[in-house]
Amino acid sequence: MMARAAFLVIAGIAVAAALALVLRRNTVHGALFLVVNLGCVAALYLMLGAIFLAAAQIIVYAGAIMVLFVFAIMVLIPGKEETGPDPRRTWRLLAAPLGGALLLELILLVVGRTAAPAPTGAAPSDNVAAIGRLLFTDYLLPFELTSVLLLAAMVGVLLLARSREGSAEPQGAGPEASVRGSAKPQGSEPEASLR
Amino acid sequence: MIPESWYLALSAVLFTIGVVGVVIRRNPLVIFMSIELALNAANLALVAFGQRTGSPDGQALVFFVMAVAAAEVAVGLAIIVAIFRVRQRLSVDELSMMRW
C-alpha cells in the first residue's frame, strides 16, 4: 500500500511537470520542469529495481543532456519566438482530439494486453553486475556501435557548429576533436550574443 | 507490489503529452524537449516490461536508447544553433524551406 501511494505521488508530479513543460511559455522553466520529470522517472526506475538506469538517468539525462539544453536556450535568446498571435491556431487546436485519441488507443492496448504473471524481479543488489555482463557479452557489438555513433555525432556537431569565418583550420585528430567537440556550446555562445 | 499496468498507463500518458507538445509548440527547443519526454515514456515502458521476465535485457535496451538520445540531442541542438545563426528567428512555422 505504501508503494502504491508513493507511485501515485511520483506519477502525479511527473505528469504535472510534463504538462507544465508543454503548456508554459517560458522555455527555461520548461527545461527545469523536464528535469523534474526526468527525476521522477528515475525514482520510478528505482522502484522497479533498475538501479543502474536510475543513476544513468540522473547523470546522463538530468546532468549532461539538460545542461546542453539550458545552454542552447541561453544562447538562442529565450522568449523571442512565441510571443505573437498564432496564425495557425485552429490547426493546432486539432492536437487536443488527436492527443485524446492517441491516449485512448495506448490505454486500450495496455489494458488489453497485460495479463501479467507474477513479476519475478531480479535481486536489486546484482542489478548493475547483471547489466554489465549482458552489455559486454550478448550486446557487445551494439555496445561498440554505440561508441562509434557517439563519435560520429561528435564530429558532426563539430562540423555543424563551426563558424564560417574560422574554417581555415584543418580537421583535428581524434583527441583534439573530442576536446573541441565537448567545448562546442561555449565556442558558439559569443557569436550569437554579439548580434 | 505495484501492478505493471500502472507503469504502462503512466508511460502512455507521458508519451501522449510529449506527442501533443511536438504538435502544438512552435519553438524547436521545446519540441526537442517534448521528444525527450516521449523517449523517456518509452524507456519506462521498456523497464516495466523487463521486470515481468526478471531479465535485465530491457534495461540494456534502455541504456542504448539513452546513448542514441544523447547523440540525437547533440546533433539536433547543433542544427538549431546553425539555423538560428542564419535566420535570427526561431519558429518552426518559418522553416518551410525544404517543403515541397
Image (cartoon, coloured by chain):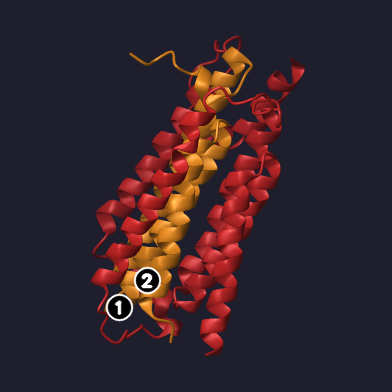
Chain colours: A red, B orange
Farthest residue in the bottom direction?
Answer: A1
Disc assigned to residue B52: 1
Circle 2: residue type? Ala
**Residue occupying the point 36% across, 83% down:** A122
Establish if A35 lies above or below B30: below
The image position of residue A102, as x and y in percent, is: 36, 51
Is A108 drawn above or below residue A191 in the view shown? below
The image quarter in which residue A176 lies: top right
Q: Secondary structure at mark 1?
A: helix
Q: Which of the pair A183/A116 is nearer the observer?
A: A116
Tell me, yes or no, whether the two marked residues, 2 and 1, touch with CB atoms within 8 Å. Answer: yes
Q: Is B75 in front, or is B43? A: B43
* Mark carried by residue B48: 2
Residue A109, percent from left and from top: 28, 63
Answer whether residue B35 is visible to the viewer in this image.
no
Quadrant into which the C terminus of chain B falls: top left
Label 2 to label 1: alpha-carbon separation: 7 Å
Q: Position of residue B18 (x, y in %)?
A: 47, 48
Disc 2 residue crowd, few under 14, some 14–19, many 20+, Cα 10 Å: many
Horizontal side of A109 relative to B5 (left or right) equals left
Around disc 1, counting alpha carbons within 10 Å, would you say few (fewer than 14), some (14 to 19), or many (20 or more)?
some
Residue at the right extreme, as displayed = A194
Q: Is residue A4 above or below residue A191?
A: below
| Quarter occupied by the N terminus of chain B | bottom left
For the residue marked with disc 1, what is the amino acid? Arg
